[in-house]
Image (cartoon, rainbow, N blue to C red):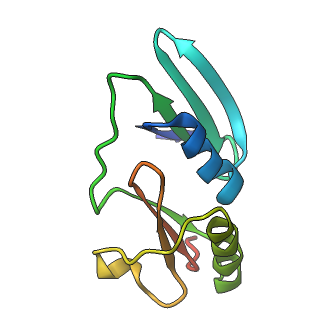
Amino acid sequence: MALMQVRVARPTRDLDRACAFYRDAVGLPILSSFADHEGFSGVILGLPDAAHQLEFVHHDDVQPSPTAEDQLVLYLGSATAVADRAVSIRAAGHEPQSPSNPYWTPEGAVAFVDPDGYWLILSPDRWG
């Protein structure tokens, strides 16, 4: 099976806050957005491009319910890249947190909690 693209979608309480966190603080580009499509509004961001997407959807009847294991892990490839991205996120008013799972506390990794309570892990590791 050849996988062409992947999109992960999840609900948000506040589309503007989620967008500000992931677009402005994390630095992901917006690929598309939609407003009031039968009550649903959303934004689609690239991870880092159109082949890998993160979608946030808002609807009054759908609420996020994150757990400690709901994580988005960005493998940035170096401690310098993690530190640079962490500075941007902290400048936006979000402080690093300690995840409950010790796997995500290796040297050089930094964890944040997004506006909806989901974990964002910045890892210096590289896959592939």
Residue drawn at the location 58% of the way across and 70% of the way down: 128
Answer yes or no: is residue 52 visible.
no
Picture layout, residue 93 above or below residue 3: below
Residue drawn at the location 27% of the way across and 56% of the way down: 67
Residue extending farthest to the front is 93
Q: Position of residue 46 (x, y in %)?
A: 66, 45
Picture layout, residue 17 above or below residue 92: above
Residue drawn at the location 58% of the way across and 80% of the way down: 124
Picture layout, residue 12 above or below residue 76: above
In the drawing, does residue 100 fall left or right of residue 120? left
Camera-side residue of 57 and 17: 17
Number of marks in the rendered image: 0
Residue drawn at the location 54% of the way across and 14% of the way down: 36
Residue 71 sits in quarter = bottom left
Camera-side residue of 91 and 53: 91
Residue 5 sits in quarter = top right
Q: Position of residue 33 (x, y in %)?
A: 65, 27
Picture layout, residue 21 above or below residue 91: above
Q: Position of residue 95 (x, y in %)?
A: 52, 72
Q: Position of residue 122 (x, y in %)?
A: 54, 71
Answer yes or no: is residue 39 visible.
yes
Residue extending farthest to the bottom is 107
